[in-house]
Image (cartoon, rainbow, N blue to C red):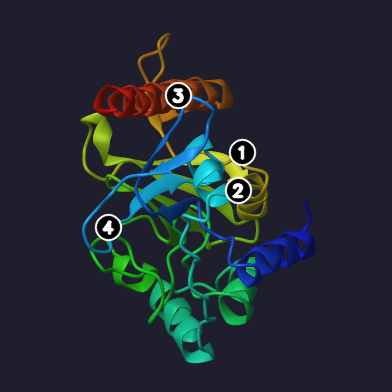
């Protein structure tokens, strides 16, 4: 996809309030037919389910999914501040999304500039900027468990980098992902985006970014785990009945 196509697709998703990889659903269980059976709960308890998962689709069909809130774009001053602190202009596509669509909050956890969507520590992309990190890298998304996606703003290619401190290496574990920001966002729109993952090459022992095949293998493991969890929920409901 070209930059304009990516921009329009993201703008449409945000306008339709269908912009997050995670949705909030009222508690329930999948029954044997794949339907959503509400579970009594106190207060305003909500569960987080992955967008497009069987649980999400079933809850959506039952009217048990909370609508996502509208997103607001960033101010010109906030974007200018981010570029000044970074010391480089943001990629044109990212800059336009911030100014015209949303100050973060969409996709896998895209971070905003000042006043925008933060990580789980309350930090925006601007707050995450650190002079000890590689020059020109801008923290564009937070995946959880300390894992971030960065975009290289030091050149015109806007290539993506991952940061994964969970390998047991030094805390600052940066590695190139080999795709551009445009491709990264295109993969999200197509449902093919995977979080950065640092792996040790089985042949050389060198730490590197995961290949597409390694990402797919991990996604399969996660899907199988989700199936087991959903089956346990269903089994538990049958036992209670």
Badge 3 or badge 2: first in the primary sequence: 2
Q: Of marks 1 and 4, which one's residue comes earlier in the chain?
A: 4
Position of 103 relative to 198 (above/below)? below
Image coords of residue 134 (percent x, y):
37, 55
Cα gap from disc 3 to disc 2, whole angstroms:
17 Å
Q: Do residues under tags 3 and 2 come within 8 Å of each other at their CB atoms?
A: no
Q: CA distance from mark 3 to mark 1?
A: 13 Å
Q: What is the number of the mark on residue 192? A: 1
Picture coordinates of residue 24, whole percent (x, y): 41, 56
> Which of the 4 quarters of the picture holds residue 44?
bottom left
Q: Residue furthest front?
A: 241
Say which mark, if any, is on residue 188.
2
Of badges 2 and 4, nearer the viewer stands 4
Q: Secondary structure at mark 3?
A: helix
Picture layout, residue 87 above or below residue 62: below
Q: Estimate the x, y position of residue 84 in percent, counting from the top left.
A: 44, 81
Sequence-first tag of 3 and 1: 1
Tell me the element at label 2: helix
State whether residue 158 appears in this view: yes
- Residue 162 percent coordinates (x, y): 43, 44
Q: For this rendering, which residue is in front, 238 or 160?
A: 238
User: Residue 45: which numbered mark, if any?
Assistant: 4
Give the answer, above or below, for where 122 lies relative to 238: below
């Amino acid at each position: 996809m070209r930059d304009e196509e990516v921009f329009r697709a993201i703008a449409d998703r945000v306008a339709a309030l269908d912009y997050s990889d995670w949705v909030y659903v009222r508690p329930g269980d999948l029954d044997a037919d794949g339907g959503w059976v509400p579970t009594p709960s106190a207060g305003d308890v909500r569960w987080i389910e992955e967008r497009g998962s069987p649980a999400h689709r079933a809850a959506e069909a039952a009217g048990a999914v909370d609508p996502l809130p509208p997103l607001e774009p960033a101010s010109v001053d906030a974007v200018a501040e981010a570029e000044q602190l970074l010391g480089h202009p943001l990629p044109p596509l990212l800059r336009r999304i911030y100014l015209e669509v949303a100050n973060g909050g969409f996709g896998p956890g895209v971070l905003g500039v000042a006043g925008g969507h933060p990580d789980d520590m309350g930090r925006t992309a601007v707050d995450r900027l650190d002079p000890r990190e590689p020059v020109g890298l801008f923290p564009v998304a937070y995946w959880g468990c300390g894992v971030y996606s960065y975009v290289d703003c030091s050149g015109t290619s806007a290539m993506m980098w991952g940061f994964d401190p969970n390998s047991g290496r030094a805390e600052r574990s940066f590695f190139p992902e080999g795709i551009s920001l445009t491709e990264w966002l295109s993969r999200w729109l197509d449902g093919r985006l995977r979080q950065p993952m640092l792996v040790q090459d089985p042949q050389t022992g060198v730490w590197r970014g995961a290949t597409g095949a390694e990402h797919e293998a991990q996604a399969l493991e996660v899907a199988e785990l989700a199936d087991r969890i959903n089956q346990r929920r269903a089994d538990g409901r049958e036992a209670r009945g």
